[in-house]
Image (cartoon, grey):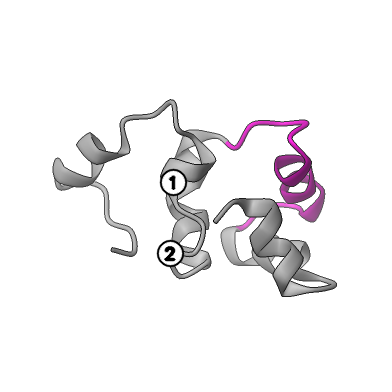
């Protein structure tokens, strides 16, 4: 699921809740949601954890080889 869909299902305040969970300001989550800023690769695992795996790193940043990172052992997210 993409970030926009996830936040849309969460209703009013979903972006602020996610922002608080991952330690960023809500406006940044809104910018990621609308595509005006790309989600930094280092934030993707935080988002995946906070969404219980609903929004996966692969969806947020398909340009990163997440399979490699997941199998190297230093990368732990919801599986």
* Secondary structure type for disc 2: loop
Q: Which residues are magenta?
A: 23-39
Where residue 45 is drawn, which disc sits there?
Answer: none
Quick one: which residue is furthest to the left in this view?
72
Question: In the depicted view, which residue is nearer to us: 23 or 52?
Answer: 52
Instruction: Check residue 5 for magenta coloring.
Output: no
Q: Position of residue 18 (x, y in %)?
A: 66, 64
Q: Position of residue 19 (x, y in %)?
A: 68, 59
User: Taking 21 as reference, is 42 above or below it?
Assistant: above
Q: In what quadrant of the picture does the C terminus appear?
A: bottom left
In the rendered image, residue 64, in percent from the top left (x then y), is placed at 39, 29
Left or right, 7 with reference to 23? right
Q: Which residue is at 79% across, 48% downward?
A: 30
Which one is in front, 68 or 5? 5
Q: Is 26 one of the magenta-colored residues?
A: yes
Q: Which residue is mark 1?
A: 57
Q: Are marks 1 and 2 in contact (CB under 8 Å)?
A: no
Residue appearing at x 46%, y 39% in the figure: 42
Screen quadrant of the N terminus: bottom right
Q: Whole-percent x and y of residue 11?
A: 80, 73
Q: Residue furthest top?
A: 63
Calculate the distance from the C-alpha at mark 1 to the C-alpha at mark 2: 9 Å
Q: Is residue 30 above or below residue 36?
A: below
Query: Residue 13 occupies which quadrant of the picture?
Result: bottom right
The residue identified by callout 2 is 53
């Amino acid at each position: 699921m993409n970030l926009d869909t996830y936040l849309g299902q969460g209703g009013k305040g979903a972006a602020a809740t996610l922002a608080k969970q991952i330690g960023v300001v809500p406006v940044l989550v809104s910018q990621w949601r609308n595509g005006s800023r790309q989600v930094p690769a280092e934030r993707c695992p935080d988002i995946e954890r906070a969404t219980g795996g609903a929004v996966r790193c692969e969806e947020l940043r398909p340009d990163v080889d997440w399979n490699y990172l997941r199998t190297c052992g230093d990368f732990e997210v919801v599986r």
